[in-house]
Amino acid sequence: MLRLPSLSDISESLQSALKRYFLCVIVAIIATTIAFIIVDAEPQGDFPATLKVLLCCALAMPLFFSVHTLFEQEKKIHSAVLLAIGLSIISFFYISLPEENNNGISQTVPYRFVIWNIVFHLVAAFSAFSNYTEINGFWQWNKTLFLRFLLASLYSVVLYFGLAGAILAIDNLFSIDIIDKVYMRLWIVIALLFQPLLFLSGIPNPIQSLQNDDSYPKSLRIFTQYVLLSLVAVYMIILYAYIGKILIEWKIPNGWVCYLVIGFSIAGILALLLLYPLSEKEEYAWIKKVYKAYYILILPLVVLMTISINIRLQAYGITPNRYIMLTLAFWLAGIAIYFTFFKQKNITYIPMSLALLGFLSVIGPWSMFNVSLYSQYNRLIPVLKKNNMLVNGKLQKISDKDFKKASMYDLRTISSAFTYMEHWKSQKLLTPIIPEAWTKDTLFKQNGELITYKLEEKLGISLNEYIYRTNDTTDIKNQSQIIEINVSSTNFQKETLSIKGFNNFAEIVFCPQKNDSTNYCYNDGYLLTGKITDYKGNIIINQQVYDSISFETIIEKLKSWKEISSTYSTYTEGKNLVLQSPKNKWKLYPNFIKLYKENQSSKLELIEVRAYLLYNE
């Protein structure tokens, strides 16, 4: 018969939680107080100190929970040492946050907060049991934490809506003017104080007793075996079908597949972890076979994921998102190899290894922020040098001659690098190459951040306006109309292109250049003639002229298009604009076209074409 807890039981559990996890309770009280201050105070700056403290409390809760748990298990380690380590980590995070009067917040803040939060929760997962001989205790410990969290959350939600309904009833029935902030304050108390206390009060004492616990909820087995594993099987079939499609049609992998592989892999690993205690029982011998088969089947998906990431790394460099995806790909490969080929299988290595990689990914010179920043910086510097905007280690204004030679690809590379550094508040990396004379001008904000658009003005480039370069002296301000056309069609995106019959793929840009120009970018094209109404040019591959090309057929089709006079439009029949060489040497899929049209004239001049190129070497 189910025995409901008495008031004395609840009181004893709360007292035990206060004693065992006093640091967590202190953090919960501080977080509740700070949240009240934030709700009641007027906004102060972009990143007030109160918000910084609240973020630190959110990290301190799982961290100090792990500290308390580890101290209970490892009596040899003095509690003061563990406390000092925990406070040092939280202090480091606080210092890394921007100043209160900072004009804008670096995107490193949410990345670092989320990753550290995940790391500290993973540490909590193995803080009580980490030895190979304690795998059952490890599993029971995480089961207890998971179920306790669900129960505490359920109680909190029901309690909040119940009390909020009561307050609403009093407000309406007795005409008492209750301010809206009361509901927010109620949620703060329940979410930041009541829920953690209820969670902590249910933690077993002593924790080591879990090692001898062999209970397994039947409902958990049914859910995992018939629901979660079935979903994993469905996604496995989808992903392998997609691999087959790629091999048959020889297509470029869709970038979105990375997220699907990660989600599928995590769900599969979770399902197998939930079934782990049953794998030692004779009637569930099939679980061990599923274990081995699953990790073997993960490996081709990791290869697919790595190929997809590598394509984007070569084209656009490293960013934090790609860094995370690549790290997870290597982690999945390592886990799959370990559980496939190693005889001794310790499931505690799963959270341990992931926590270690997560921690390393946000600190040190190898962190995702530093690696990504220098990747973009290293893409920027050669382009500046190539266009004579960086001479003797210092920036200089581009000459008219170099400006006319500069390709649209190079200018977009500069623009994207500046934009990246601005979003990530990393413009200080450019400071050493800025001439001293420029620093006297208003290139910097009061907080020391570089104003990138003013730097662009100093360089003599306008990256936020249309750039129109021809052999004549046509002034862009006198142009009658710039027409931008996005080209789309069914099965016309980069991810869905069929590359059957070709062995190479490139994203290519055509824009006007001088006839004698040899200032090619890596994969680009240029339009040859001074009067760019001949629509002829060259395809550049690996800085070499690959073949000639004519866009005349595309222009003729666009002239008869009813929406050609619109400034911005979408051409939905993209298949009609596909160009192909006579001997099937290459095939071009335009995705963006920019034209110039004079007033009261039907003549169209070609300014820019962006396209996907399939070709054979």
Image: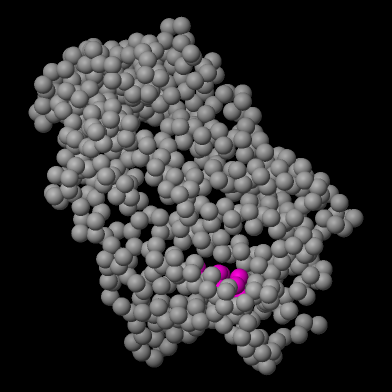
Q: Is residue 75 visible?
A: yes
Q: Which residues are magenta?
A: 59-69
Q: Residue at x 68, y 93 (%)?
A: 8
Q: Residue furthest top?
A: 583
Residue sitting at the far bottom: 8
Which quadrant holds residue 198? bottom right
Rendering coords of residue 197 (x, y %): 58, 81
Q: Give the percent coordinates (x, y) of residue 372.
A: 42, 44
Task: From the viewer's side, name the closer residue of 313 and 385.
Answer: 385
Q: Quadrant of residue 500?
A: top right
Q: Taken as a whole, is the magenta stretch helix, strand or loop?
A: helix
Residue plotted at (24% across, 56% down): 448
Quarter in which the N terminus is drawn: bottom right
Residue 445 in the figure: left or right of residue 132: left
Examine the rendered structure and indicate whether residue 515 appears above or below residue 335.
Answer: above
Q: Looking at the image, which residue is at 28% across and 27% down? A: 386
Would residue 213 appear left or right of 30 to someone viewing this image? right
Residue 358's spot in the image, x, y percent? 55, 54
Residue at x-position 31% and y-position 65%: 99
Is 60 rendered above or below residue 251?
A: below
Q: Is residue 209 magenta?
A: no
